[in-house]
Amino acid sequence: MSERLSQISSHTRAAVDSVSNPLDPLTASEIKAAVNIVKKAYPDKSLGFNVVTLAEPKKSEVLAWIASPTSAPLPTREVEAVVIETGVSGVWEGLVDLDAGKITSWKKVDDVAPILTADDLIKVEKVIRTDERVIEQCVISGVPREDIHKVYCDPWTIGYDERFGTSRRLQQALMYYRSDEDDSQYSHPLDFCPIYDTETNEVIAIDIPTIRRPLSKAKHANFHSKYVEENLGGYRKTVKPINVTQPEGVSFKITGREIEWQNFKFHIGFNYREGIVLSNITYDDHGDVRPLFYRISLAEMVVPYGNPDHPHQRKHAFDLGEYGGGYMTNSLALGCDCKGVIHYFDAAFSDRAGEPYVIKNAICIHEEDDGVLYKHSDFRDGYATTILARGVKLIISQIFTAANYEYMVYWIFHMDGTIQLEIKLTGILNTYVLGEGESTRGFGTQVYPGVNAHNHQHLFSLRLNPMIDGVNNSVQMSDAVRYAPPVGSKENFYGNGFLPKATLFKTTGEAITDYDGSTSRTWDMINPSKINAYSGKPASYKLVSRESAPLMPKEGSLVWKRASFARHTVHVTPYVDRQFYPAGQYVPQTSGEPSRGLTEWIGDGTANIENTDVVLWHTFGITHFPAPEDFPIMPAEPMTLLLRPRNFFLQNPALDVPPSYIQTTSGARSAGNANVSSLTDNISRLAFDETKTDEKSSCCSK
Ligand code: ABN
Ligand code: CU
């Protein structure tokens, strides 16, 4: 077991929570039990446990159990295991029935490379530091032989390199130098790239550029106290504390892994790959419990880099499919990652030896002030007639570290029925050395002397299995269009007419569509049988997503082939159990020939997706042209999308949220337009009112 893993597990290998829902992630003891069953069945094999995770039960079984948890059978507790046999390429794929205590399926899958785990990544640095050929390259780059312990690497999967194929599990070591162990290595990249065999633990090749770029002589850039002290005169002294007070606690209720909050109810799952998974999201519409989504999750992502020179074409990380958004998740710190009154869930995984370990505080659940929910004032009485309700939002979050980058994932529930996904990017840019006087040729930016941060994209795949008022749904695209009759015509004399145009998708082929900002394009997940009595339109949740960068690598490129989900903004497929990963089940070292996942499921594009159980796959993200402000550590950059109820309710569903300020016209008149409010909070105060200090206020920060 790696050092990191043993540190995590030594103080947390505790008693595990009991399972109360078929979608609950595996507990540490269930992982142990599954591993023991496999080990007992194959005592003579040397096995490494790459993945031991919940094999999610069939949707029909889960829905039957939800409908009548006391009488319907609890779906079988099944474990999916991906197992590496020492010295054998490919993987063993197993299913273990925990209830029966036996293996129900065990098959060899060849020509695939399993995910890279922390155990795989952590060992590379030690080996490259002792490899004579690597040391020689370090010395050529300008690192003195006695400084080899100051050489570091970020091991990435090789991506795909036609020279090596898929039979060996390979990593490319992106090389760096730290002058001091507390320094950030990213200001001192090295120009060569060793290739490492994960199973034989050896360097099998080194990619050496034809033009050498020696180690930069610039001082190390950093972001720690010492650097701030020495270079910026210390930390700014102008930040006053802001405390969050929730004197009556939280307004959510948690039972097992189910949460109830402001009419929403759902299950919070977590797995090695997608991280947070939200299932069975319902909304209690005044006693009518209405289903919204069966399951929503981040299913994949790709980060293609835009420098065409070898070997940078290999830099296109699938951080979920190649490393796992759950495996890389951080243990969150109270008051730092999230502030306020927090509830955490831990996450249990298996290490390569089959030993369970627990990441404490992997998921953070908390509420935040959500600003103004709605407001209106009447100008007739000088705005004395006013109503204003403030909102609260519920946030389910995780943060994972993908070597240099941090991805902060926030699933946000709003009081108006909106579900928002916000992802913030922070951490450190991936960097390469820029030779003295060398031009980036536009493929990157010099963000610090001698540091070239290559252009890249962050493209995510969101998997949405809607269940809007029932399982049978359709998807339609909505565009704002100008009314066709010309200016001066009888129907559109002034030419101002415009209206929404809905395009209903009947087949998977029709649903392959792209974002179009010029038509304010959105997509609706609708229940065609549930028509809103006022609008006459079907009940829907609308996908509003404006950060929708098109895949920059060209059609036919390696990334285009491997990341077929990223070719378009929206794909829709008929629901199939356990069809989760749009770039394929095994992503490392795929050539994209043929493309795995989504393109296989879409096939010839003729499958029906109308009024049936559907999955909408949405690609969103940004194109990142780095700038010096992103260095040496990036201020968090947000990107967001919304799932909004449209024609779902008969009126604003938040009308019953108590307003923070309310004054009716008759009330204002009888109070002589005095500033009257029933509900204004007494914690807020005037910033420069000397008569009220922190001590005197009712703020409970002490
Ligand atoms: N961004 C690529 C990556 C992620 C995790 C670990 C190593 C490399
Ligand atoms: Cu970026």
Image: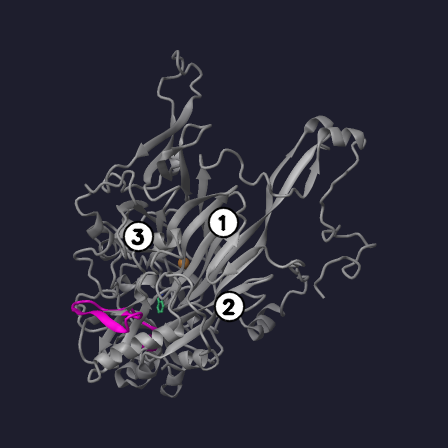
Q: Secondary structure at mark 1?
A: strand
Q: At which x and y percent is residue 95? A: 25, 68
Tell me if residue 104 is in the magenta stretch: yes
**Residue drawn at 21 percent across, 72 percent down:** 92
Q: At which x and y percent is residue 483? A: 38, 22
Label of residue 264 in the image: 1
The Cα–Cα distance between marks 1 and 3, rounded to whole angstroms, is 22 Å
> Which is closer to the viewer, label 2 or label 1?
1
Of residue 447 and residue 687, the one placed in the foreground of this image is 687
The Cα–Cα distance between marks 3 and 2, rounded to whole angstroms, is 35 Å
Q: Residues within 10 Å of mark 3 (few under 14, many from 20)?
A: few
- Residue 470 vertical position relative to residue 49 in the rendered view, above or below: above
> Quick check: can you spot residue 418?
no
The Cα–Cα distance between marks 2 and 1, rounded to whole angstroms, is 25 Å
| Magenta stretch bounds | 97-121
Amino acid type indicated by mark 3: Ser
The residue sitting at the front extreme is 71
Labels 3 and 2: the sequence-earlier one: 3
How is the structure coloured here?
Answer: one colour
Q: Which residue is mark 3?
A: 60
**Residue drawn at 44 percent across, 16 percent down:** 494
Q: Secondary structure at mark 3?
A: helix
> Quick check: can you spot residue 537?
yes
Of residue 679 and residue 555, the one placed in the foreground of this image is 679
Label of residue 239 in the image: none
Horizontal side of 181 relative to 486 (left or right) equals right
- Residue 25 vertical position relative to residue 69 in the rendered view, above or below: below
Label of residue 332 in the image: 2
Labels 1 and 3: the sequence-earlier one: 3
Labels 2 and 1: the sequence-earlier one: 1
